[in-house]
Image (spheres, rainbow, N blue to C red):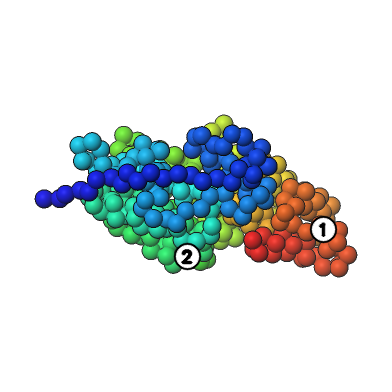
Amino acid sequence: MKIFHHQVTDFLALLYNRAALEKAGIIPPPATIADFEKAAEQVVQRKLATYGFETNGTANDVLPFLYTFGGGMLDPHNKPLVASDGSVNGLTFLLNLKNRDEVMPKNRAPQRYFIQGLRLAREAHDRLMGGQILSNLSHQANYLGNFSEAIQFARAAQAATVREASATVRAMFFTMEARALASIGDSQACAAVLHRAEQAFDQRNPGDDPDWISYFDAWELAGEAAHCFRDLGQPDETLRFVEQAIDPVQTPARTRAFIEMASAAGALRAGDLEQAVSIATDAVRLAGALRSSRYLQYVADLHRLLTEKDASHPSVRAFTELVGVSYPEHYSKPHAIEKKNNPRAASYALSQHHQAR
């Protein structure tokens, strides 16, 4: 007989820096989870604090986020809630604070959250939730540069859910493995796994899918493939999937900026410098306040390729100016660098500045 312990009911308070919030124009302090996320981003973007939010990653700190999104440990009848969409969304929100919004310290706290989630999923005998958490761990590991771990997590997600995962879920798990394989430059294995993802997606039946996978549509699959081929340096395949990855109405601006930067890299590698600069310029303007290090790395990589191709080209010089104006906190002024007569220096100013953060 399994006896579940009562939920933790300790009272937790969110401490905030009133001066930093007021300087960011945040008055009164955030009262909703959406306002909380936005405030944390604004404080970091305006350099009023190194991080917008910190926690030590214990289970006690995770629970409020599960509750906020409608999840928890147990319902009133002692039925486990850890496998609910609310609990998974709460854990995912914490991961996004770290990886997407970049307002938390660069440590492994989010991984601790998900490992705790795996334990909870095991307690609830929910393999599908465990698979989802493993795929999130794969995504995080790939982002942090732990590519072997990313591959292992993605394959573990597939193995753990052989009987439970819908075709759409299987497709998503395959794309996580493909992204990690692209990161290590294994083009043959990456292409093979992407093909398996496409085959699984072709068999999808939306009626079989859990609610949390609803975001993974044909555009999302194509976007993942575009990122893979961008990382592999294959322009034709990159551009082919970019064309399939953007819906002019439904694709969020943040996602479009990422995909268009991948498209610009594909155009440049295909030999069309003017087209590459045009696409990249649109992407920078579309990105707006986006400052994630992954996006900035895309910008830095493209700028390096452009300056290596022809640093004196008027379009490249114009793009250099645009990047300098758009990301002054990451970028040295190009005029001072150009006086050194180093065609690669302008690009390195962005990437090295960024990597030092």
Please tell me which residue is depicted at 41% across the width and 45% down the height of the picture: 12
Which label number is shown at residue 73? Answer: none
Neighbor class of circle 2 (other Cα within 10 Å; few <14, some 14-19, many 20+) is: many
N-terminal of the pair, mark 1 or mark 2, is: 2
Residue 273 at x, y percent in the picture: 74, 53
Q: Amino acid at mark 2?
A: Phe
Report the Cα–Cα distance between label 1 and label 2. Answer: 34 Å
Tell me the SS state at disc 2. helix
Please tell me which residue is depicted at 24% across the width and 45% down the height of the picture: 6
Res 70 → quadrant: top left
- Report the front residue among 291 and 206: 291
Please tell me which residue is depicted at 38% across the width and 60% down the height of the picture: 153
In the image, taking residue 101 as reference, residue 265 lies left or right, namely right
Residue 60 visible in the snapshot? yes
Q: Amino acid at mark 1?
A: Pro
Tell me the SS state at disc 1. helix
Residue that badge 2 annotates: 147
Which label number is shown at residue 334? Answer: 1
Please tell me which residue is depicted at 51% across the width and 46% down the height of the picture: 15
Residue 10 at x, y percent in the picture: 35, 46
